[in-house]
Image (cartoon, helix red, strand yellow):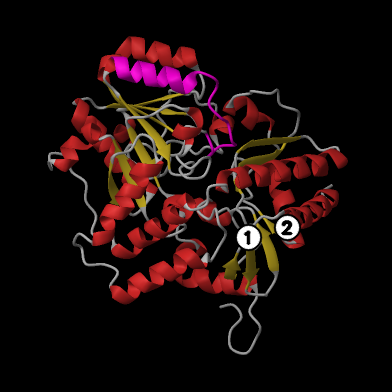
Amino acid sequence: MGDSGATRPTNAGLLEDIREVVAGGVSSSMRAASIPVPLVVRRARGCLLWDVEDTEIVDFNMGYGPHVFGYADREVLDEVADQFAQGHMTGLPHAQDAEAGALIAELVPGVEQVRFANSGTEAITSVLRLARAATGRSLVVTFEGHYHGWSETVLRVGKNTLHLQGHEPTDVVPGAPGMIPEALAHTRQLPWNDEQAVRDLFARCGDRIAAVILEPVLVNACVIPPAPGFLELLRDLTTRSGAKLVFDEVITGFRVARGGAQERYGVEPDLTVLSKVLGGGFPVAAFGGRKSAMTMLASNEAHHAGVYAGNHAALRAVVAMLRKIRATPGLYEELEDIGAYAEQSLREVFAAEKRNVLISRVGSIMSVSLLKRPVRSGAGLRETASAIDFSHHRRFQMQAQRAGVYFHPNALEPWFLSTAHTREVIDKASGALSRALISLV
């Protein structure tokens, strides 16, 4: 066992203690590679973490994205604490259900009705089942590099191994040991932003497609926005074929604009999935659309369940978070300014050390990847991934963490900014990142 008793705890020692009782030391396989340098958090506030050794760290991971106002936001936490005092879970309708749903409907263009879930994976599983029930079809179209949770019917080979394994975009490769390969037989995967591939698939089997699901901005494998006209093409093809267009806005919802990517790009899907910013870090998700798209759930002809779905504490967090977003009219201009300043600062850091780097950004979501060679503007995921220097990027992350800055060590993972990332904080972090780069050989 690690450090205990009167001995001052260390990250490495306490992580070993955790691994004794928590398999691998983490409760999500997605986090297994996130701590090549041991890190155990004691507390977090704003955009700062303090580990068990009382080291202060500037964080650009931000809980994988939900904290647009920073960690430990009192306006949200005080509301949720009050709800716990009143009872946080009865399994029955609550008066705030109406407000939570109404706030989503007010802010998100394509949503009039919702159902609540506990996680993005749960919500996506339910929304795809709803699309299949509503259309009477089974085929679901996904895009390479997009992550839609870990359920059996959508998890394909990991985004960080695509470029190494030589798979074609349409290969059916289960994303984890123990999956049933046949569960993926009713999906087709296409390259992101490939208009011809989409047109060809709809020409061949458009009458069998139940849904096209996508991150309207690819943020789970670098940050690659939709090509001009691509979302509009998907909207047109799904409408004409009778398929459902599903935007997975688990990350982009309430982050790239008040109404998410569908507001930013002006394309309305049939169904939308939301999480992360929705609850400011509390475990909650939602899916919804126009009332016509939710008819089968409203009449209980389609199935969606979950004992803890829509629990009162989670929905109080939703109400508090969305009220604050609604009451902060300049929020997204501020986040855009913070993002632009961070992007420019990082470009200067890498330029000073003459390092090839790919930096891409949409609003307050940013991708930073060390490269083996330059990548042309507008390159697709495969071309980009083949140029990334994964080993050096991981070493860079380790040195940065030692210098007081944390970001995910996988070069494909996005960075997240918040209103707590002031210019002063970004300047401080840029200095630490510069020192980390200099230390690489």
Q: Earlier in the sequence, mark 2 or mark 1?
A: 1
In the image, the segment drawn in magenta is 218-240
Q: Is residue 249 left or right of residue 185?
A: right
Q: Is residue 27 magenta?
A: no
Q: Is residue 54 left or right of residue 130?
A: right
Determine the residue positioned at 63% across, 58% down: 420
Q: Is residue 370 above or below residue 279?
A: above
Give the percent coordinates (x, y) of residue 308: 27, 60
- Amino acid type indicated by mark 1: Cys
Distance in Å between CA atoms under marks 2 and 1: 9 Å
Q: Is residue 141 left or right of residue 37?
A: left
Q: Is residue 224 magenta?
A: yes
Pick whichever, 424 or 225, lies toward us: 424
Q: Which quadrant of the view contains residue 270?
A: top left
- Let me know if residue 215 appears in the view: no
Circles 2 and 1 in contact, beta carbons < 8 Å: yes
Total label count? Answer: 2
Quadrant into which the N terminus falls: bottom right
Q: Is residue 405 above or below residue 20?
A: above
Give the percent coordinates (x, y) of residue 361: 63, 37
Give the percent coordinates (x, y) of residue 372: 75, 33
Q: Is residue 6 left or right of residue 315?
A: right
List the residue tagged with mark 1: 47
Secondary structure found at label 2: helix
Secondary structure found at label 1: loop
Give the percent coordinates (x, y) of residue 82: 37, 73
List the residue tagged with mark 2: 425
Determine the residue positioned at 25% across, 27% down: 138
- Amino acid type indicated by mark 2: Val
- Let me know if residue 325 appears in the view: yes
Q: Badge 2, how many Cα within 10 Å: few under 14, some, many 20+?
A: some
